Amino acid sequence: MALTNEYIKQRLTEKFGDQVQGFLEPYGMLTFEAPKENNLKVLQFLYDEDDLSFRFMTDLQAVHYPDVKGHELAVVYHLHSLTANVRIRFKVFTDIQTPDVYSATALFSAANWMERETYDFYGVNFVGHPNLKRILNVDEMDYFPMRKEFPLEEQTRVDKDDDMFGR
Amino acid sequence: MARPVQYNIYGQTDVKLVKEGPEGLMGEGFFGTALDKVVGLARKNSIWPLPFATSCCGIEFMATMGAHYDLARFGSERVGFSPRQCDLLMVMGTIAKKMAPVVKQVYLQMAEPRWVLAMGACASSGGIFDTYSVLQGIDQIIPVDVYVPGCPPRPEAVIDGIIKIQELVGNESLRRRNSDKYKQLMESYGIQ
């Protein structure tokens, strides 16, 4: 029996009730979210069940929504089931003042560097990560570049002509 | 074959194959000139580059070293990857801020006399990557002698840059590296 989105949704709502919500299918890929306290439980459930077997985490990143107060940072996990060739997306939202999310490193070793990158660019603090420090930026940097409030351009240049850049 | 090819054309054309040597006093079996000029001539025709190739400009450098746009005919046959053995640091490609101390360390390990060529837009000024993570030009950390603009520069442009370096090397005074002006330049970069 092929693994369909309805079946995955049914299994999730049986196990977690109304904690998993926000079921959407953009471009056919099932997307749902859960409170950040349960992220490891959901990931473990999707990993352990033999008929679901989402044992390959393909991506882990974050999105910054500055307008949604209380849920500004979303940590997004992309999971893939190799036996059934199905992909799903799982999101947890967190507040920007206390961006603590449990680390998935114990379950997926791939999460190690991806969580470091997410910390480096968005400031999400992964609780339980073995080595949470900056990975791609300079170690002394004191801000998180991918958050929307920080400018893309280098601020120390003095030779840029404003009217050539549309300002 | 469209036309017959003749290889030994020395003396039959008015295009000089080899530039004239330095001025000096020529006699039967001897040639007297200034030491600066002879040393400059020797150095400029045997520059050993260190290709610090980071991104796309590195690929263009590989093409420049290939047989078609041969850089080896200018004396750069042996490219070394050890700064202790090289004269010319060619920085080719985008230098991120995290890489900047590494470039400085490589420059410090080179022995005098040393020259630096910044190839491409990213090494000269940050290029199109005007962002928080890219160093906006390597001249923020090391003194540069020749900038080769382009994204990436054509191999002919790289060869033009090397020829300009050769002119600088050939005309450099032997005392320049000990002079006050050079010391001030190094102080301004924080290099002792």
Image: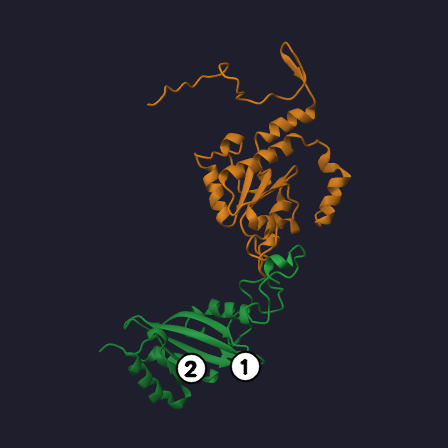
Q: In which quarter of the image is residue B35?
A: top right
What is the chain letter for disc 1? A
Q: How crowded is mark 1: few (under 14 residues within 10 Å), some or many (20 or more)?
A: some
Q: Residue furthest top?
A: B28
Q: In which quarter of the image is the N terminus of chain B?
A: top left
Assign a secondary structure to mark 2.
strand
Estimate the x, y position of residue B136 in percent, counting from the top left: 61, 54
Which mark is on residue B78? none
**Residue, disc 1:** A95
Q: Does residue B141 show up? A: no
- Judging by colour alone, the chain drawn in green in this rendered image is A
What is the chain letter for disc 2? A
Q: Nearer the viewer, residue A7 or A113?
A: A7
Q: Against B82, is A38 above or below?
A: below
* Residue beneath the point at 31% across and 86% down: A10
Which mark is on residue A33? 2
Q: In this view, does A5 lie to the left or right of B158?
A: left
Q: Nearer the viewer, residue A32 or B149?
A: B149
- Judging by colour alone, the chain drawn in orange in this rendered image is B
* Residue beneath the point at 56% across and 51% down: B122
Q: Which residue lies furthest to the bottom in this view?
A: A17
Q: Which residue lies furthest to the right in this view?
A: B180
Q: In this view, does A31 lie to the left or right of B62?
A: left
**Which amino acid, by three-letter code, is at mark 1?**
Asp
**Which amino acid, by three-letter code, is at mark 2?**
Glu
Q: Does residue B22 show up? A: yes
Q: Distance between the residues labelled 2 and 1?
A: 15 Å
Estimate the x, y position of residue B151 in percent, counting from the top left: 52, 48
Q: Which residue lies furthest to the left in this view?
A: A1
